[in-house]
Amino acid sequence: MKQGRKVTIKDIAREAGASIATVSRVLNGRNYPVSGELRARILDAVRRLDYAPGAASGSSRRSASRDIGVLIPNITNPFYPQAFLGIEAVMREKGYNILLFNTFRSIQRERECLKLLMEKQVRGVIISTVEGEADDLLQYANHGMQFVLLDQTLPGLNCPSINFDSRRGARMAIEHLLKNGHSRIAFATTPLVRSSRIDTHRGYREALAAADIPYRGDYVLISPSEPEEEHRNYELDAGRAIARQFLSDGCDATAILCVNDMLAIGVMNTLIESGVRIPEDVSIVGFDDIVFAGVYHPQLTTVRSPIYDTGKLAAMLLLENMVNSGRSQIAFNVNLEPTLVERRTVRNLTRNHL
């Protein structure tokens, strides 16, 4: 190809071994049945030849290099907007644009978002993925897309992951409840799929074992696995479902450790509506310290995670790996330290007053 000549769809088709019509359909994002291998060849040719429809090639490369993607599973959980603020602060300062996608915990929607980002030649993505498997991300990583995982780890994917030390946080919460005289402590969670949920549950079990308290399966309250709907708050509804389960089972636990604050608020909301007093009848501890934790009544005792800093660190690591693409990559798991925030939802059973 002559230097300086504008790249055309015909060039892409020749390079990828595909028809011009197929290349056009792929680039226009139409729902056309193309094999994953052929689609990857077309997108790889687009990237190598620096193809840009209706624009100069160099301009396209500069534009694409200033975009990053952010995929989150549930924008109604304040954890993710708080983390996004940290991401946005770094990207704004560095002159990058952000394409934000809410996947509503749908693996199909997540796949569609990743496909769109690849077609837009976005080279870096911060993601809190729906599933605990790396297969989908690996196929994009193998074509040069850089990832940073938020609030999870995925074995087999060579990229940074930013987490909280959920095991330690759970141990801190249980130790606080034990210190306040509680020994019948339940654990409330969404399905144990994500690595952060699994680690929190592990910390719960470790703390009970350290205190010689038997682990009871009937004290592990797991919300039903339901598809997320756009008009609902997944964690809040999960908490309400768990509270109904707690009441219908006649659970005798005096305290509940919840896997996040929104779930804790859902639990408290339904218990209070049912006449259960917090913390007089049941104590509650949350996880994350979202903004609502300090303003809900009663104010929620919780394990604080440095959410904003998590977003900033994720953004900095992604930019570092994008700059070093093809050379030495940063790929390690960062565990940020939690702290316990004592408020008004834990009753001290060792004395006769709150």
Image: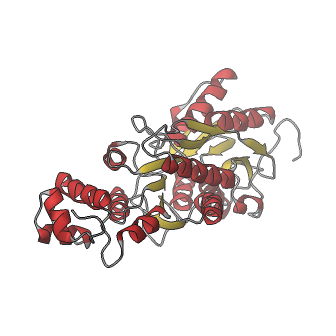
Q: Quadrant of residue 349?
A: top right
Residue 251 visible from this viewpoint: no
Residue sitting at 21 percent across and 54 percent down? 41
The one of 116 and 346 positioned closer to us in this rendering:
116
Residue sitting at 59 percent across and 42 percent down? 163
In the drawing, does residue 151 fall left or right of residue 256? left
Q: How is the image coloured?
A: secondary structure
Q: Is residue 29 above or below residue 38?
A: below
The one of 68 and 53 positioned closer to us in this rendering:
53
Residue sitting at 47 percent across and 43 percent down? 194
In the drawing, does residue 226 fall left or right of residue 219? left
In the drawing, does residue 178 fall left or right of residue 261? right
Image coordinates of residue 191 in percent, x first then y, are: 46, 46
Q: Is residue 55 above or below residue 337?
A: below
Residue 121 visible from this viewpoint: yes
Q: Quadrant of residue 293?
A: bottom right
In the current view of this chain or complex, which residue is farthest to the front? 3
Number of marks:
0
Image coordinates of residue 179 in percent, x first then y, are: 80, 32
Image coordinates of residue 205 in percent, x first then y, are: 59, 29
Image coordinates of residue 280 in percent, x first then y, are: 78, 50
